[in-house]
Image (spheres, rainbow, N blue to C red):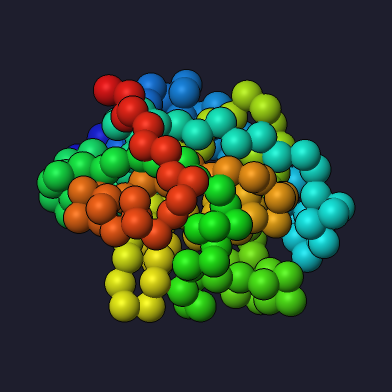
């Protein structure tokens, strides 16, 4: 039994487990892991930079249903997403300034607290990730409550869009908020989700 354990390559076992958790082959997982390490390294170079020193950012919004879970940090699978949001999401586009006017203070960042609120390393990683025009990203998720529009996921994506002066932002919400958003946002345009 002891000899059997000595012959097991635990690095390979864990690599296979991590890859399967992400729905990837071993090779795809290694490529993605290397990309993440490069992004983390490059992110250290943009940390604390003023937005006018950021690289150009490209917002290729990924509206594929299978990737909606990526709008959240704590939802690991499509099954988990369907558990928390069984009705799914609606996608819309609106002028970012208009959305920002209704964003509650908890969700809103100012230039003064840009690198003080949330996770600065995540914001820096998003900036680096979005500087590659070939990358796509899932939209932020919002709800509406008594405080106004609230970001439920994708806070750093929203912040990157805001401080890179994007005119429009694409976002997700649920059916519960559609009529209220139609009243609130004059520039709203509903989009199709890709299966």
Q: Pick the residue in front: 57 or 5.
A: 57
Q: Residue at x 86, y 52 (%)?
A: 53
Residue 74 place in picture, x, y as percent: 33, 57
Q: Is residue 102 above or below residue 40?
A: below
Which image quarter is the N terminus in? top left
Q: Pick the residue in front: 103 or 129.
A: 103
Q: Is residue 9 above or below residue 123?
A: above
Residue 50 place in picture, x, y as percent: 82, 61
Q: Is residue 135 visible?
A: yes
Q: Residue at x 40, y 66 (%)?
A: 149
Q: Residue at x 21, y 48 (%)?
A: 175
Q: Is residue 149 above or below residue 167?
A: below
Residue 3 place in picture, x, y as percent: 28, 37
Q: Residue at x 69, y 31 (%)?
A: 132
Q: Is residue 166 left or right of residue 67?
A: right
Question: Tag count in the figure?
Answer: 0
Q: Is residue 27 left or right of residue 144?
A: right
Which image quarter is the C terminus in? top left
Residue 180, picture quadrant: bottom left
Q: Is residue 74 visible?
A: no
Q: Pick the residue in front: 100 or 58.
A: 100
Residue 9 place in picture, x, y as percent: 39, 34
Residue 36, picture quadrant: top right
């Amino acid at each position: 039994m002891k000899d059997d354990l000595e012959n097991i390559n635990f690095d390979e076992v864990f690599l296979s487990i991590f890859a399967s958790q992400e729905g990837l082959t071993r090779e795809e997982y290694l490529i993605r892991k290397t990309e993440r390490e490069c992004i983390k390294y490059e992110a250290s170079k943009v940390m604390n930079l003023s937005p006018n020193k950021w690289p150009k950012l490209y917002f290729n919004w990924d509206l594929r249903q299978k990737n909606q879970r990526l709008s959240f940090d704590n939802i690991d699978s499509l099954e988990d997403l369907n558990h928390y949001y069984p009705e799914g999401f609606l996608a819309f586009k609106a002028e970012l300034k208009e959305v920002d006017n209704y964003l509650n203070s908890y969700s809103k960042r100012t230039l003064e607290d840009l690198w003080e609120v949330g996770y600065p390393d995540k914001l820096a990683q998003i900036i680096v990730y979005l500087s590659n025009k070939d990358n796509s990203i899932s939209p932020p998720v919002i709800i509406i409550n008594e405080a106004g529009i609230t970001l439920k996921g994708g806070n750093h994506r929203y912040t990157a869009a805001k401080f890179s002066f994007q005119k429009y932002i694409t976002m997700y919400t649920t059916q519960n908020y559609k009529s209220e958003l139609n009243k609130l946002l004059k520039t709203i345009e509903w989009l199709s989700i890709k299966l």
